[in-house]
Image (cartoon, rainbow, N blue to C red):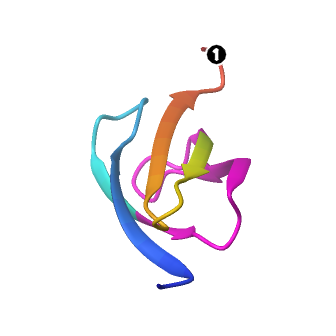
């Protein structure tokens, strides 16, 4: 099992696909990371299942 995993997400602001690194050693996470394209703050909600697979949902600060 890997401690980190690459995940592709769509920026809720500019719509670009970006690749982020998810720390799968933490089962539940909420944090903010800036888009690599438009620099707007993206809110992340991450749940990691028993197999170490992250379920990532993102939204803008206004949602």
Q: Nearer the viewer, residue 54 or 34?
A: 54
Q: Is residue 51 above or below residue 37?
A: below
Crowd class of label 1 (few under 14; some 14 to 19; many from 20; radius 10 Å): few
> Circle 1 is placed at which residue position?
62
Report the residue at 63% width, 53% height from top: 33
> Any magenta on residue 34?
yes
Q: Position of residue 14 (x, y in %)?
A: 35, 35
Q: Nearer the viewer, residue 12 or 2?
A: 2
Extreme residue in the top direction: 63
Report the residue at 70% width, 50% height from top: 28
Looking at the rendering, the stretch of residues picked out in magenta corresponds to 20-43
Q: Nearer the viewer, residue 60 or 8?
A: 8
Q: Is residue 57 left or right of residue 9?
A: right
Extreme residue in the front direction: 50
Q: Is residue 16 left or right of residue 27?
A: left
Report the residue at 52% width, 55% height from top: 49
On the image, which quarter does residue 20 sit in? bottom left
């Amino acid at each position: 099992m890997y401690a980190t995993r690459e995940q592709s997400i769509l920026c809720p602001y500019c719509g670009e696909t970006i690749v982020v690194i998810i720390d799968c050693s933490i089962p539940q996470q909420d944090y903010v990371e800036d888009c690599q394209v438009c620099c707007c703050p993206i809110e992340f909600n991450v749940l990691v299942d028993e197999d170490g697979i992250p379920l990532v949902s993102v939204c803008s600060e206004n949602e």
